[in-house]
Image (cartoon, grey):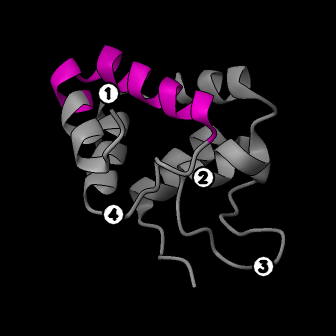
Amino acid sequence: MGREFSDMDKKIFNKLAPENGGTHMSEMGHPYPFILRPISHKIAEDADDFRERLERLDSEELEYLAMLAMEGKEDIRSLEDEDVDSFFDLLTEKVSEERAKELRIHLGIL
């Protein structure tokens, strides 16, 4: 069973995947357990599309995703390799290099 999305989770997911029409469910009818994984694996057409979607997020939303990842509530490691890079590039650019480094260390992505 997936975790229950908060209002902020829903806001971010809808911003990243507006074509889902506000649903946060898989094709099998189960709630997604994470925000970024279905975007990376099911919704984005390729790495460029994923990055363009992430660029829609502001610094507060990226920081929120980083906080969820630190708490084990968001899965960064299982994203496509290029998508992991895009996430950390944008976290560095819009939040801080320090925050990106802290999260990389925490997740063991060096």
Q: Earlier in the sequence, mark 3 or mark 1?
A: 3
| Residue closest to the eye, 54 or 15 | 54
Q: What is the three-letter code of the residue carrying label 3?
A: Gly
The structure residue drawn at horizontal position 36% and vertical position 39%, both measured from the top left corner, is: 109
Q: Mark 2 — residue? A: 37
Q: Quadrant of the N terminus?
A: bottom right
Q: What residue type is labelled 2?
A: Arg
> In terms of sequence position, does the residue under pointer 4 or pointer 2 come before the other?
2
Q: Mark 4 points at which residue?
A: 72
Disc 2: CA contacts within 10 A as few (<14), some (14-19) or many (>=20)? some
Q: Are marks 1 and 4 in contact (CB under 8 Å)?
A: no
In the image, residue 68 lies in the stretch drawn in magenta: no
Q: Earlier in the sequence, mark 4 or mark 3?
A: 3
Few, some or many residues within 10 Å of mark 1 (<14, 14–19, 20+): some
Identified at 46% across, 55% down, the residue is 75
Measuring from the top left, give residue 37's x and y in whole percent.
60, 52
The circle on residue 59 is 1
Q: How far apart are marks 4 and 2 (CA)?
A: 13 Å
Relative side of 108 to 11, left or right: left
Q: Which amino acid does label 1 sit on?
A: Ser
Residues shaded magenta: 80-100
